[in-house]
Image (tube, helix red, strand yellow):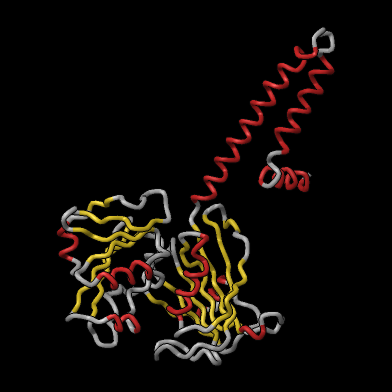
Amino acid sequence: MKSLFKFLWWVLKIKWWLIPIIGGIATLLLYKAYYTHYELWWHKMEMPVVFGTFLFSLFIALRTFYEEWDRKLPKRLTVHFKLHDERNSENGKYIMSCHDAYLASEADIRQWGQQIGRQMANELDFEVFIDSTKPKRINGLYNHYSATFFLTKIPKQKDKTTPDLNSKYWVWIVQHLQTPETKKAVFDSHPNHPYSKEAVLKQANKISFQNIVFTGKKSSKDLVTFNIKQEEKFTLLSFSLAENVQPAILFTLTPPDPIVNNFAHKGVILSGRGPIWLYCYLCHFYHPTKFVATYDPRLQGAVVVESHGSEYKVGDIIPVESSLIANNL
């Protein structure tokens, strides 16, 4: 009986179009069995056709509602970084993993995964292909995606706050529902298989917490300062320049990380006086968030320039009080 229910559920999800066909045939056979006294064949067909059409329309509607519900579920991404020369071996070495990062769209898996890797370590050298899996629905709350990048060499140590990845395995776990923090764990060797989130959380002595309000990192020349303010549906990111800046500053510029500061699931509103190329860089940097908008004081609001959700579309103006902008500078 359990297998029968699994099969029926599979039919509903994958072969849903068979249901109205089978229902129509069954209705036709029943009608033929009980109403054979009709003289004209189209009298026999009238009710089955009407009922079959109703069934077909009903299941089309149910399937449409199901797909729309599935599309609107939140998305999470777990990304692993593995040495390229071991990718076909069971003894492959995993260097880094990040569990449950917010994902705006399935199309952003490659770009967002690369950005996560650069937040965890220094510049990455990896193969052009990635290994991704089909999404799994977790407790009906969100769709979980997984991707593996194959590194051609181990990244260099980013700074003194990051581990030496030549011998350490680094894991991040992004918290979404419980607390606004990112849990980080360092293990003494590279495993042959990536550690699951549950396995990492069981080893409390390996975990450190990052639950600090980020006021902004500066570039190496201390020319750009960032400030963030969290609102319910968006994060306001304001920046200020100490002096005129040159495009070369983008090589070392480090804007606030949406994963570490737990605002990747929201939109980002950019505000500040700066060159157009700096705004373009920030729009690209925050592309994986829910939406990106730029504040225009003449409109007393922020104009949405890219969006991954249905709540806001490109061209919408989000009202923002000028006092909120002033207080965030």
Residue 307 horizontal side relative to residue 79, left or right? left
> Residue 320 location, x and y as percent?
22, 55
> Residue 278 location, x and y as percent?
28, 73
Q: Which residue: 17% across, 81% down?
A: 243
Tell which of 137 and 127 is nearer to you. 127
> Residue 281 location, x and y as percent?
33, 72
In this rendering, is residue 175 above or below 27? below
In this rendering, is residue 203 above or below 270? below
Which quadrant does the N terminus fall into? Answer: top right
Q: Which residue: 32% across, 69% down?
A: 280
Residue 128 horizontal side relative to residue 317, left or right? right
Tell which of 296 and 320 is nearer to you. 296
Q: How many marks?
A: 0
Residue 20 horizontal side relative to residue 258, left or right? right
> Residue 122 location, x and y as percent?
44, 85
Q: Which residue: 17% across, 58% down?
A: 297
Quarter-of-image position of residue 276: bottom left
Which quadrant does the C terminus fall into? Answer: bottom left
In this rendering, is residue 132 above or below 219? above
Tell which of 173 and 297 is nearer to you. 297
